[in-house]
Structure formats: C-alpha cells, structure tokens
Image: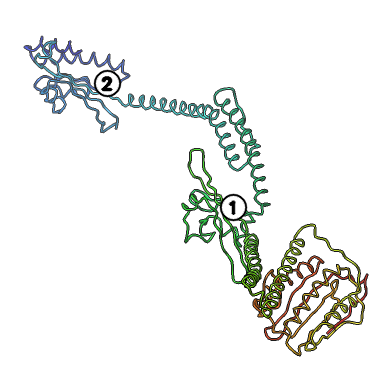
Amino acid sequence: MQYSLREEILKERDESMPKLEESLKSIVMEFSTGLRDVSNGDILEIRVIDDRQRILATSELENQNLIGQRSNTDLVRRAISAETLFDIIKLDNKTRNRVWVLANPIRAGAGPDDEIIGVLYIEANIESVFEQMNEINRIFLGGTAMSLVFTIFLGILVARTITQPIADMRKQAQAMAKGNYSRKVRVYGTDEIGQLAVTFNHLTNRLQEAQSTTDAERRKLDSVLSNMTDGVIATDRKGRIILINDPALQLLHISRDITLGRPIASVLGIDQEYSFEDLIHMSDAINLNFSTSDAPYILRANFSVIQKETGFINGLITVLHDITEQEKIEMDRREFVSNVSHELRTPLTTMRSYLEALADGAWKDENIAPTFLNVTQTETERMIRLVNDLLQLSRMDSSDYELNKDIVLFNSFFNRIIDRFEMSKSDKVQFARLFPETSFYVEIDTDKVTQVIDNIISNAIKYSPDGGNIRFGFTGQGDMLKVMISDDGMGIPKENVGRIFDRFYRVDRARARSMGGTGLGLAIAREMIEAHGGKIWAESEEGQGTTIFFTLPYDADEFGEAGEWE
C-alpha cells in the first residue's frame, strides 16, 4: 500500500489537488475495505498525510470533511520531523477500547535517505488482541497451574519413595537413642535407599548385641563394686567424681547425692595439701586420718590413672581401705615389742650390775653378798614369770587353743579359791562373801578360771590399804553367771579404766614393778574369760577402790535357778 501511495503522490504531485485527493481516496478505501475483511473490522481508520501535514485521504466516511485540513496529530509531526515510524497505544474515549495508532513516513524512493513526501496514519482497535492475549494467558496460567499441581503431586510421590525410608530410619535412630532396639526399618526396594535400610537394620542388631554385652559387663562391674569391702571412686579428666560405690560412701560417711560432680580432693578432705594434678602423679598411698578424740579412724587411699592408648589421661581411680584395725595392730605390736624389751632390760640391767659387783669382789663381803644374790634371784624369777606369761598369751592367740572344761559347783569352787587366799593374807585385810543360797553349776576350765580369779584377788590384796575390805559375790543373769570381786584400794583414774586389760599396761608402773607384776595378768584374764564366751570389765573411782566383773555362760534350766547377791 505504501508503494502505491508513493507512486500516486509522485505521479499526481503536479496535478490539481482535487484529482490527487480522489485518486488517494480510491486507493485508501480499497485497501481499508480489504484490510477490514482480513482483520475482522479492527482497522478503524487509514489516513494519508503529505509532508505539510495536510490530510490527503481517509478511509473513514465520517471524516471525509477533514480532507485538505492540516492534521494536528503529534504522532504525525514526529514521524515527519524524525523521519521514522512512531506508534502508540491509547484508550478510545468513546468505546473505552485500546487503540493502536501508527504513523509511518512515506519516502520518495526506496532508500533510507530519500525525501519524506508524506505519512501513512493508521488507527486499529486492538482490544480483541488483548482479549486473545488474556485468553492465551489464562490458558497458559491454567496449564501452568495444572502442570505445577501435577509436578508437585508427582514430586511428592517421588519424594515419599525417598523420604519415607529416611523418616523410618530417623524414627529408628530416635528409638535406638532411647534404648529400644526391637523396631526395624521397612525395606521398600533394592535400590540404594533399600540397601541403606538393610544396612541400618544390621547395624541395629549389632548395636543391640553390643548394648547387651555392655549391660552385662556393667552389671558385673556394679556387682563387683557393690560387694567389694574396699571403696572405689572414679573421676573424669577434670577430677570430678562420676562413680562411687557403696563401701566408699560408708567409709567416708557421706551420701551419693552430695558426692557426684564434686572434686575428689575436696571429698577426701585433702584439697589443702594436694591438687588433682598431684594425685595423678601420686605413686604412693595416702593415709587419711579421720580420728576423733573418741575413736581412731584411718583410711588408706591408693590412686591409679585411667589412661588411653594414646597416653591421654581420662580420669582417676581411687581405692579406699579401712586400716584403722591394721594401724592399731601395728601400734600394739610396736608397743608390745617396746614393753617386752623394757620389761626384760630392767631386770637384766639390775642383775648385771649386781653380778659385776660380785665379780669385782663383793662376794667376799658376808654382809653384802647374800643381798646381791637374793636380788639377782628375785629378778631371775620375775623374768621367768614374764616369759611364762608371754608363752601363755602366745598359746592363747593361736587358733588351736583349747579349754578342758568340767561341770563344777561354782559356789564351792569360788569358796576354795577364797579360802586359799584367806589363809595367807594379812589380818589387815578383811574378806566378805556375798554368795546366794542357790547352787550354781557351770562348765568351765577350772585351771584357767582359777588363774583369772587368783590374779584379780592378788591385785586386790596388793592395792588394798590396811583395814580394807575385799568383797566377793556372784549371781545369775539370764544365761550368764556374773562374778564380782571388789576392793577398797586406791582406785583407777577414769580415763585409764578401759586400758587395764591391755598387755603391759600399768596404772602405776613403778609400784607395780616393785610388787613383782609383769603387766600381763589382766590381759591373760581377759583372753581366758573371752575364750569361755564371757566378758570382763572394771568399774572404779580414783581413791574409792576398784570392782572387777566377769561373766561365764550359764544354763539355768540345766544347772539350777539363779539367786541374788547384794
């Protein structure tokens, strides 16, 4: 069309204007009619405008009166001045439809630099285009939405085939963390996920077996720790207690709640002397002394490091052992050796000095020699008694010590012993017998019990003042026969009463030695009474005398009824 218009304008340029307008009108109307048929009537108007902006032709019948008038359309002016095509989309004020407006320059030739001789101005209704675009968009969006829904649905199905086994594995892992190994992961296929599920189930079985083994070993360890007599404490690498058995709690007299998590040095009461680093490098045991004024109490602590193969120290094991009795035995042993040495050294020293004097010529002096020999003989006899007492204690300490028991009437037995002492005692000491009228039969080793009573009566006579009384009595108390021997002697200090039955113990050492005592008599008496199944003890107040009590097993149903003494 643009070519036909250019040719017509150039051909008719020199002709009269009415003839040009008729020719252009005919071309525009013909083209417009054909274009409307093709575009379903969307072409609203076609105008031909010359280079002076005069309307030469229009396809719109209602605008035929505009032919020859100057066009004031800005788009036309811009197309002429810029020599290029311009188009815009505007809104029709009447129909409110969107209209596409085009202004295309018409050149004198086909070249881009040829002279502009006019403008082809076209208005077209493009509302149907937008409706078609909207319809296409709706179809596209609908298809997209359906595709998206289908894709999501398909993705969910595909994802579930992957995530479901993984979710099952996660649940199984959570169950395993709680100690439940009975649950198994479902195997959905033979792919990688299925193989992973099979491997996971195998891992569960292995973990269950390992956990069972660990639990069994833990139960064994707990049983061992609980039944140990020694206390065991375990710490972490920072020295905080993570395990302590019941014996350790009992030895330390503490509760588990206040112990776990605390530093071990603080719990053992040695935090002022030792740090945790010191305990790690400790090669020797430490004695923990918890003794009080009432009773001794000593624990021994041995330390062992928990160390990995790499050398990393992971904690500390402490073993506690009660060595109170062991320390007491050791102390008694040292004291016993010291006492025996002292008891033997004293008479030997005395004998040596007298024998040296006799060797130096004192034997020629008739006044001195008998005295020296008498002292030597006395000290020799005292050493013999001491050795005999030690031998007797040694025999009693042995496991094969036996008693030769006989059933005797204790009333007569006790009387015979007292009668023997009464014949040899000084008249300055009086005996008082507080015996019941009932007869008491007991089964005893008469030699051993006689030795016990002899020792007690001898001590009572030794320490009784002139005019003092020694009282004797016995009575039945349940299944025991209780015997009493009391004197009015100087008494024993309260703090020493419990020790008079210890070996070599003397309240007044100098006086006891001068009276010929070995310090073993009451110790032997205690061993003999305890061998019979009885007990022996003393009650005394300093300056008011001493009372010795001992008991012997007694069967009232078999041997008779008990009486009373005062």
Kind of residue sitting beneath label 1: Val
In the image, 555: left or right of 134? right
**Secondary structure category for the residue under label 2:** strand
Q: What residue is disc 1 on?
A: 319
Q: CA distance from mark 1 to mark 2?
A: 108 Å
Residue at point 82%, 68% (across, down): 448
Residue at point 64%, 56% (across, down): 247
Query: Image quarter for residue 9?
Result: top left
Q: Is residue 131 among the parts visible in the rendering?
A: yes
Q: What residue is disc 2 on?
A: 43
Return the x and y of residue 431 as percentages of the image width and height.
Answer: 82, 85
Label number found at residue 44: none
Residue 76 vs residue 535, the one in the foreground: 535
Residue 60 vs residue 317, the one in the foreground: 317
Which residue of the protein is positioned furthest toward the front in this rendering? 364
Residue 73 vs residue 230, the one in the foreground: 230
Q: Is residue 76 above or below residue 352?
A: above
Residue 266 vs residue 419, the one in the foreground: 419
**Secondary structure category for the residue under label 1:** strand
Q: Is residue 340 above or below residue 418?
A: above
Mark 1 or mark 2, earlier in chain: 2
Which residue of the protein is positioned furthest toward the bottom in this rendering? 467
Return the x and y of residue 404 as percentages of the image width and height.
Answer: 87, 64
- Circle 2 Cα neighbour tier, 10 Å, few/some/many (<14 / 14–19 / ≥20): many
Kind of residue sitting beneath label 2: Ile
Query: Image quarter for residue 563?
Result: bottom right
Quadrant location, the N terminus = top left
- Circle 1 Cα neighbour tier, 10 Å, few/some/many (<14 / 14–19 / ≥20): some
Return the x and y of residue 512 as percentages of the image width and height.
Answer: 68, 77
